[in-house]
């Protein structure tokens, strides 16, 4: 019985930690807007874009002012002139269209910082930093007034969205940010490298999982109730 209780407590702990990390991720978007003091200014790349997009300025971010399901969706991010020396995580702003990181003493930025940025169309960097993914990822790259401009992100897959040489057989290629792509199993294929044909057995996979979750939750509830009564 003690072993079962310990196992139940471990499952509960994992569940709580998962909720915690999910909550931390949801806050990341708001934290990105506060990486630097001040607010988005007029007559800047992000400021002009926000005005044309009828967006809403919040600190260093431009938020989409529409009827989407996410009222905090970031479409513009201005971190220029913030004295930033490094940039390691912008995942909270993965929905952004325009990013300005110019006029910062950043020495290097990993391409992985922009992984998953599917909507990114205009990126402004310090002059000495190359556009992520290079020529293969952007329609146009220019250096103007001490700034590296990366315009119009290319689709790393072929334009038809069909089978790709970069993905295994029975899979489709999908863009995943400048210089990145990801592979999805084609219809009626699933499993490792999409080698299994037929529909994914969702009921067989998730049915026992859901049942075991209910049983474990019930046992945990009983255990905690007994502990409460003993007190």
Image (cartoon, rainbow, N blue to C red):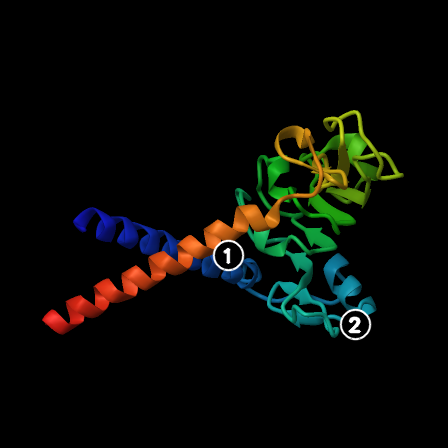
Residue closer to the observer: 102 or 10: 10
Q: What residue do we see at 81% from left, 45% from top? A: 151
Where residue 52 sits, quadrant-wise, is: bottom right
Q: Position of residue 175 (x, y in %)?
A: 75, 41
82 sits to left or right of 163: left
Q: Secondary structure at mark 1?
A: helix
Dot 2 or dot 1: first in sequence order is 1
Quadrant of residue 216 within the rendered picture: bottom left
- Residue located at (70% from left, 43% from top): 199
Secondary element at image label 2: loop
Is residue 48 visible in the rendered structure shown here? yes
Disc 1 residue crowd, few under 14, some 14–19, many 20+, Cα 10 Å: some
Side (left or right) of 92 relative to 68? left
- Residue 54's label in the rendered image is 2
Residue at the image position 32 percent from the left and 54 percent from the top: 13
- Image quadrant occupied by the C terminus: bottom left
Going by the image, does 17 lie left or right of 141?
left
Q: Which residue is mark 1?
A: 25
The residue sitting at 88% across, 38% down in the picture is 159
Q: Position of residue 93 (x, y in %)?
A: 62, 55
Q: Is any part of residue 90 visible from this angle? A: no
The disc label shown at residue 120, or none = none
Image position, residue 214 (x, y; %):
40, 60
User: Compared to 48, does 151 lie above or below?
Assistant: above
Q: Residue pushed farthest right?
A: 160
């Amino acid at each position: 019985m003690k072993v079962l209780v310990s196992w139940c407590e471990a499952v509960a702990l994992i569940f709580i930690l998962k909720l915690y990390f999910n909550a931390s991720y949801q806050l990341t978007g708001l934290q990105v807007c506060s990486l630097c003091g001040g607010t988005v200014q007029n007559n800047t790349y992000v400021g002009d874009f926000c005005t044309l997009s009828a967006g809403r300025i919040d600190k260093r971010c431009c938020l989409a002012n529409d009827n989407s399901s996410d009222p905090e969706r970031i479409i513009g991010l201005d971190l220029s002139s913030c004295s930033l020396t490094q940039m390691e995580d912008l995942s909270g702003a993965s929905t952004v269209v325009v990013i300005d990181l110019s006029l910062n003493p950043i020495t290097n930025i990993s391409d992985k910082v922009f992984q998953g940025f599917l909507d990114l169309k205009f990126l402004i960097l310090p002059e000495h930093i190359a556009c992520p993914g290079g020529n293969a990822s952007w329609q146009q790259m220019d250096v103007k007034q001490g700034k590296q401009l990366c315009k119009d992100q290319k689709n790393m897959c072929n334009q038809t969205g069909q089978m790709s040489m970069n993905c295994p057989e029975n899979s489709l290629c999908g863009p995943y940010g400048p210089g990145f792509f990801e592979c999805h199993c084609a219809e009626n294929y699933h499993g490792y490298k999409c080698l299994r044909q037929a529909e994914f057995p969702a009921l067989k996979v998730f049915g026992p999982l859901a049942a075991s979750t209910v049983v474990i939750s019930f046992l945990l509830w009983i255990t905690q109730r007994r502990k409460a009564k003993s007190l």
